[in-house]
Image: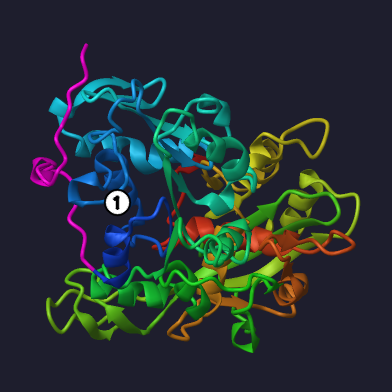
Amino acid sequence: MKPVTIEHDGGLDLGVFANAPRMKMHRQRRRFLRSRKRYGIIAGGRRSGKTVEARHRLIYGSKHFGGIHHGCLTPPPGVADPTFAYCAPTRDQAKRIIWEKLKAEIPRWAIRKVSETELSITFITGAKLYVVGMDQPQRIEGIPLDGVVLDELADMKPTAWTSSIRPALSTPDRPPGWALFIGRPRGKNHFWKLIQDAQKPDNVADWDVFTPWPSWVVMDPAEVAAARRDLDARSFRQEYGGEFLDDAGRAYYQFGPWNLRQVAYNPQRPLLLGFDFNVSPGVAVVAQDFDVEVDVVACHRCAAPMPGRSGRPCRMCGVPQAFEVVTAFIGEVWIEDDSNTRRVCERILELWGGVHHGKVICYGDPSGGARRSSSERSDWQTIEDYLGRRWGNLEIDLASEDPGPRDRVVVTNSRLKNAADVVRVYVDPAKAPHLVEDFELTQLDDNGDLDEGADRKRTHISDAGAYLLFQRFGSPIVGRRGVSSRAM
């Protein structure tokens, strides 16, 4: 079928894309839309609109308002097979982030074919758009590209751009292709280094950098206030302010004397168990939640600011305001060497089996169900077998995938003390001394990864606590990853 040519000398009506979201204008976005450079980098906060701009660039390009970037509806003339790509760190991420939104925003008259298997869309102009995970870069390696978006470059291999993508943008007898990099700041890694290189005098003719690209300029003020309450100050600056901050240093920098407190154990309230599967040491944490009265930042019903204290009606809509949930770590298991999940469970039963009568809920590394710490049973099967015999109401609450250490650390710091100085985690120093030590001493390396230390005993018990906190609370940034719960 002959490709259709859409004139783009200012006559392309963007209004036909009725489903496309309309973005608020701000300084960095205005610079981005006016840019005439081949390469662009948006380092922005979450929910700041950077992925929306990427979709628009792939679909429309910028030729229709005087730019230099071709898109699927405005492909380079004379090219028989115009090709564009959206790339994320993995195929599952790429599909989750953009696939359904692309299909919803592109009008049906513009689409010739959609391949769910290949994750590709062929346009009436003859252009083809691939949605690709860089865990499988071979799907587009060797294919000439006319434009590409790389999303969350910090989570890709450092060579993803230079080895897999950059050569495909320079094909003889074809106009030079463009590239747009978007992502959140994640410390001073290869994404940060790319930005530094782009701003060198030898490169500024071809590169534009748009940072910081903060979220709060486009978000509802009530949502911003809620985020400030749910995050610690440093995480808010990075995740919503789009700022690059040094990652090296203490992982749990919000932990301090304000988190140390003895809390009375209640045998009727749910007992929360956090696991991180390891041999030396074998670990688990024990916690309970309780409610505290606070000054509420925004009403959960009408979003009115400062609606009143917990338990009292909102001054605007009259709905009673929620109490703050505080998690108290009231115990731990620490088996120094030659441990396994069975021994950890036996220790839990020794300490709590004879006294606890309420519900028991387990949290931890979801990949534990596929690993084996002994020759007999997987970790989660062992927990079900041993703890389920004592507690018939045992529940196992797992994410469908590991949220990753960085996201767990963000959530844990926000619970330790948020930007409003609200503390939502207590640790009993007498009953959980190893957890206190791990929160105090666990470090991040220069890449922002958790450092186990020379003896490889660091991070494990704090990971057990972080899994528990992440799965219970997530955050407006990270959220809870799809839940896989099992009840005995």
* 184 vs 142: above or below: below
Image coordinates for residue 237, horizontal then vertical, percent: 46, 75
**Drawn side of residue 363 relative to residue 213, left or right:** right
Image coordinates for residue 121, horizontal then vertical, percent: 31, 26
Image coordinates for residue 201, horizontal then vertical, percent: 54, 67
Element class at badge 1: helix
Highlighted magenta segment, given as a residue range: 1-25
Q: Is residue 275 visible?
A: yes
Say which quadrant the N terminus sits in. top left
**Drawn side of residue 410 relative to residue 276, left or right:** left
* 290 vs 286: above or below: below
Depth order, front residue of 392/99: 99
Residue type at mark 1: give it: Val
Q: Is residue 267 visible?
A: no
Main SS, magenta region, reads loop
Say which quadrant the C terminus sits in. top right
**Drawn side of residue 476 relative to residue 163, left or right:** left
Q: Quadrant of residue 321?
A: bottom left
Residue in the picture at 68% in, 43% down: 383
Label count reads 1
Q: How is the image coloured?
A: rainbow
Residue in the picture at 22% in, 67% down: 25
- Crowding at mark 1 (Cα within 10 Å: few <14, some 14-19, many 20+): some
* 106 vs 307: above or below: above
* 160 vs 262: above or below: above
Residue picked out by circle 1 = 52
Is 121 colored magenta in this rendering? no
Image coordinates for residue 161, horizontal then vertical, percent: 57, 44
Depth order, front residue of 311/359: 311
Residue positioned most to the front = 173
